[in-house]
Amino acid sequence: MVDFYDLEAWKEGHKLALLVYGMVSKLPSDEKYGLSDQLRRASASVTANIAEGFGRFHFNDKIHFFYLSRGSVKEVQSFLLLGRDLKYLSVVDVNIVWTQSKSAEKLINGLIRSTEKQK
């Protein structure tokens, strides 16, 4: 690994953020500072926390930020369900982003396990 962007977990998280940003552009304008903003922040936080964790020296610090990243994935998933149930987001769009979020989540879990083994 040369840098954080070489991590598969970061790459899948980045794909998640790109999908989220594309999807929220379809939300009603009155959700600009609500659901749209929350989804964007949570999805961007996935990769930001992986990057910050990668840059930390101590394994416990790294793991802490990787856990935060996984929490952000769960936050995205929660907002996806809310947007779907409010009928702001289509079931098709939610399913696409949901699948990507599960892919990112699995890789983040692997990153956590791998880092814990290095302690």
Image (cartoon, rainbow, N blue to C red):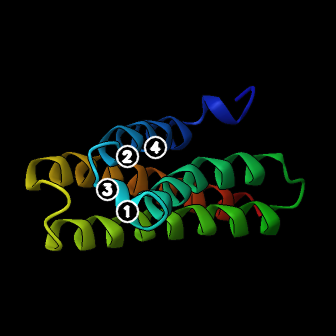
* Left or right position of 112 against 64: left
Of residues 16 and 9, the one drawn nearer to the viewer in this rendering: 16
Dividing the picture into quadrants, the one containing residue 7 is top right
Question: Of the residues under marks 4 and 3, which one precedes in the sequence?
Answer: 4
Q: Do the residues labelled 3 and 1 touch (CB within 8 Å)?
A: no
Question: Of the residues under marks 2 and 1, which one precedes in the sequence?
Answer: 2
Q: Are marks 4 and 2 in contact (CB under 8 Å)?
A: yes
Q: Are marks 4 and 1 in contact (CB under 8 Å)?
A: no
What residue did someone put label 2 on?
Answer: 20
Q: What separation in Å lies between label 4 and label 3 (alpha carbons)?
A: 13 Å
Question: Of the residues under marks 3 and 2, which one precedes in the sequence?
Answer: 2
Q: What separation in Å lies between label 2 and label 1 (alpha carbons)?
A: 14 Å
Q: What separation in Å lies between label 4 and label 1 (alpha carbons)?
A: 18 Å
Q: How crowded is mark 2: few (under 14 residues within 10 Å), some or many (20 or more)?
A: many
Nearer the camera: disc 4 or disc 1: 1
Q: What separation in Å lies between label 3 and label 2 (alpha carbons)?
A: 14 Å
Q: What separation in Å lies between label 4 and label 2 (alpha carbons)?
A: 5 Å
Image position, residue 48 (x, y; %): 67, 49
What amino acid is at disc 2? Val
Image position, residue 88 (x, y; %): 20, 61
What residue did someone put label 1 on?
Answer: 31
Image position, residue 30 (x, y; %): 36, 62
Determine the secondary structure under disc 4: helix
What residue did someone put label 3 on?
Answer: 102
What residue did someone put label 4 on?
Answer: 17
Q: Residue furthest front?
A: 30
Determine the secondary structure under disc 1: helix
